[in-house]
Image (cartoon, grey):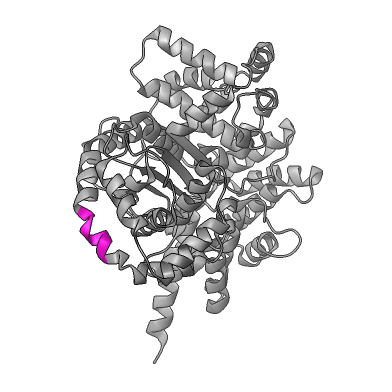
């Protein structure tokens, strides 16, 4: 029966689907850990699709008029070699390049870098994402996969890729120890266990042909940095990106917890120097402030240097860096991982004091064009916005009721939890998270029909949780389990597949759907005569 299965496995997953530290409590992680072993979801490697894309760019004339005085010998030699290529496929690449050429070379390079990151393996180079998941910049390069595939075959780029491997392997080896140290220090401080099997990935792609700009990208749960090698390793950039990989999920896991601090954001969003893509993205701004605060803890800085950094963050609009930095001192004295301590740290911030402090700040004026250009010359940071929940009420009373309900679910008190969620629904009849809470209550009550009704409401029709990836993904998973228990295997399979297709779904929900879909397929195979 599904409910016996829930008692053994799913209650653990259920807790991970909730959004409070109480529901996600686990045994304290040790403060000291041995040196990390290689993890398949954190990689440093070359990328044939990226290499082929850059070859095509140079063959088309990219940076043909740029002096190679500061280039690596490998990059300069490759540009000269690639510019001499001839053939119908090369002509097609050059025509495509010039038809899509932009005066802003950095912007143009950005599009092709995105292409290399999201492309599948040679020789097809088909995107690994659905069209609606592709970065907007990449849509301007529609049709390039077919052209690049022909170029790859005509010019035997696969053989060239194998020939240059010693250059790439040397750079990968040089990066290994510094990157491992960054990963070790960050994961130890945040008490985050590496899980090679998780769906989220952090990739460092070594590509000397990209040049000195360090490109930092993320799309959904996949983070990537492109390093040129043959120069000083940008440790600060790598650490910043890796901390985003670890910390970005937290504001999305606890949206109603951070919602209380939104008045501070409304003031900070007016700062002229605040990154443009953060002006209407509260969760990403909160994550950025958290990353910057943790960075200050990990960097070796004098008290005066740290105070200057805090003042700079205030002036630039990252005004929560200071209170988060202060809260990290209490975190260091406690046992939970940051993933579990985060709600408490946010709740401990004095909202009234932080609003007053933010309102009293004089934000720095917009940086000059020259300063912005200099920044882009060292780091090209592109955030791919994840789908964030818009279904959390903004009044304190309802937030408190949701918080009580989730705590009571974690305490396995379905009657009191049900009362809390119904109080929210009395004020907001369509409140998605309250309905989700009632679905969890039905699971605890072993009430299959009621669970099917609630999770069915949340996965289809006008009340579906399309704006809340966490609720939508887990509702598909729980509905699939109920259907499986009823013997409706095909419908159950469809629900698991739907969970995997939810953009921005929690990693745990996707892992649960993937595993149980596999188990379901094995069971069906075994049942065949």
- Residue drawn 43% across the image and 76% down it: 521
Residue 344 shows in this picture: no
Residue 391 image position (x, y, % from top left): 70, 46
Magenta stretch encompasses residue 163 = yes
Question: Which one is in front, 56 or 437?
Answer: 56
Q: Is the magenta stretch mostly helix, strand or loop?
A: helix
Against 77, residue 147 (above or below) is: below
Residue 461 shows in this picture: yes
Q: From this viewpoint, which residue is outermost toward the bottom?
A: 529
Residue 9 image position (x, y, % from top left): 43, 57
Q: Is residue 265 left or right of residue 324?
A: right
Question: Which one is in front, 219 or 353?
Answer: 219
- Residue drawn 44% across the image and 52% down it: 61
Question: Toward which corner of the image does residue 408 lie, by quadrant?
Answer: top right
Residue 443 image position (x, y, % from top left): 58, 58
Q: How many marks?
A: 0
- Residue drawn 37% across the image and 83% down it: 526
Residue 128 image position (x, y, % from top left): 47, 62
Quarter of the rendering occupied by the C terminus: bottom left
Question: Which one is in front, 393 or 503?
Answer: 503
- Residue drawn 35% across the image and 71% down it: 153
What range of the chain is rendered magenta?
159-165
Q: In this view, does 465 lie to the left or right of 60?
A: right
Question: Toward which corner of the image does residue 451 lie, by quadrant?
Answer: bottom right
Question: Which one is in front, 358 or 453?
Answer: 358
Q: Is residue 422 left or right of residue 8?
A: right
Magenta stretch encompasses residue 51 = no
Question: Toward which corner of the image does residue 294 lie, by quadrant?
Answer: top left
């Amino acid at each position: 029966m599904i409910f016996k299965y829930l008692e053994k496995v799913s209650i653990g997953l259920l807790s991970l689907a909730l959004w409070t530290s109480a529901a996600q409590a686990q045994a304290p992680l040790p403060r000291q850990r041995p040196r990390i072993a290689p993890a398949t979801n954190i990689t440093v490697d070359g990328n044939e699709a990226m290499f082929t894309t850059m070859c095509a760019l140079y063959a088309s004339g990219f940076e043909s008029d740029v002096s190679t005085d500061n280039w690596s010998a490998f990059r300069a030699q490759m540009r000269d070699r690639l510019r001499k290529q001839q053939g119908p496929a090369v002509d097609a690449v050059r025509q495509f390049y010039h038809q899509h050429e932009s005066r802003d070379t950095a912007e143009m390079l950005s599009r092709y870098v995105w292409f290399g990151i999201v492309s599948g393996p040679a020789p097809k180079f088909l995107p690994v994402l659905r069209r609606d998941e592709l970065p907007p910049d990449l849509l301007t390069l529609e049709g390039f996969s077919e052209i690049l595939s022909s170029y790859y075959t005509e010019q035997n780029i696969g053989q060239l890729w194998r020939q240059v491997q010693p250059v790439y392997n040397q750079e990968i080896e040089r990066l290994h120890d510094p990157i491992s140290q960054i990963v070790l220090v960050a994961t130890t401080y945040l008490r985050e266990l590496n899980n090679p099997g998780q769906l989220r990935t952090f990739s460092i792609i070594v590509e000397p042909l990209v040049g000195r700009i360090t490109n930092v990208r993320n799309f959904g749960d996949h983070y990537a940095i492109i390093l040129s090698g043959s120069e000083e390793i940008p440790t600060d950039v790598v650490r910043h990106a890796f901390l985003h990989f670890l910390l970005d999920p937290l504001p999305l896991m606890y949206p109603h917890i951070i919602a209380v601090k939104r008045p501070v954001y409304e003031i900070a969003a007016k700062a002229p120097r605040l990154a443009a893509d953060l002006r209407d993205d509260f969760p990403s701004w909160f994550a950025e402030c958290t990353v910057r605060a943790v960075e200050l803890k990990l960097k070796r800085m004098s008290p005066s240097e740290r105070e200057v950094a805090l003042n700079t963050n205030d002036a630039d609009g990252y005004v929560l860096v200071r209170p988060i930095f202060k809260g990290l001192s209490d975190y260091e004295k406690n046992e939970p991982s940051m993933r579990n301590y985060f709600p408490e740290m946010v709740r401990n911030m004095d909202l009234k004091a932080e609003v007053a402090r933010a309102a009293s700040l004089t934000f720095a004026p917009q940086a000059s064009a020259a300063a912005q250009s200099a920044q882009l010359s060292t780091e090209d940071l592109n955030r791919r916005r994840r789908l964030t929940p818009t279904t959390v009420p903004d009044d304190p009373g309802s937030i408190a009721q949701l918080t009580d309900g989730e705590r009571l679910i974690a305490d396995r008190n379905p009657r009191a939890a049900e009362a809390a969620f119904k109080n929210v629904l009395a004020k907001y009849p369509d409140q998605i998270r309250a309905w989700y809470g009632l679905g969890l209550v039905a699971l605890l009550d072993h009430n299959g029909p009621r669970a099917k009704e609630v999770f069915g409401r949340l996965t289809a029709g006008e009340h579906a949780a399309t704006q809340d990836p966490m609720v939508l993904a887990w509702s598909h998973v729980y509905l699939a389990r109920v259907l499986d228990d009823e013997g409706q295997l095909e419908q159950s399979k469809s629900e698991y597949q739907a969970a995997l297709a939810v953009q921005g779904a929690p990693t745990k929900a996707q892992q649960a759907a993937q595993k149980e879909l596999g188990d379901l397929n094995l069971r069906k195979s075994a049942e065949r005569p």
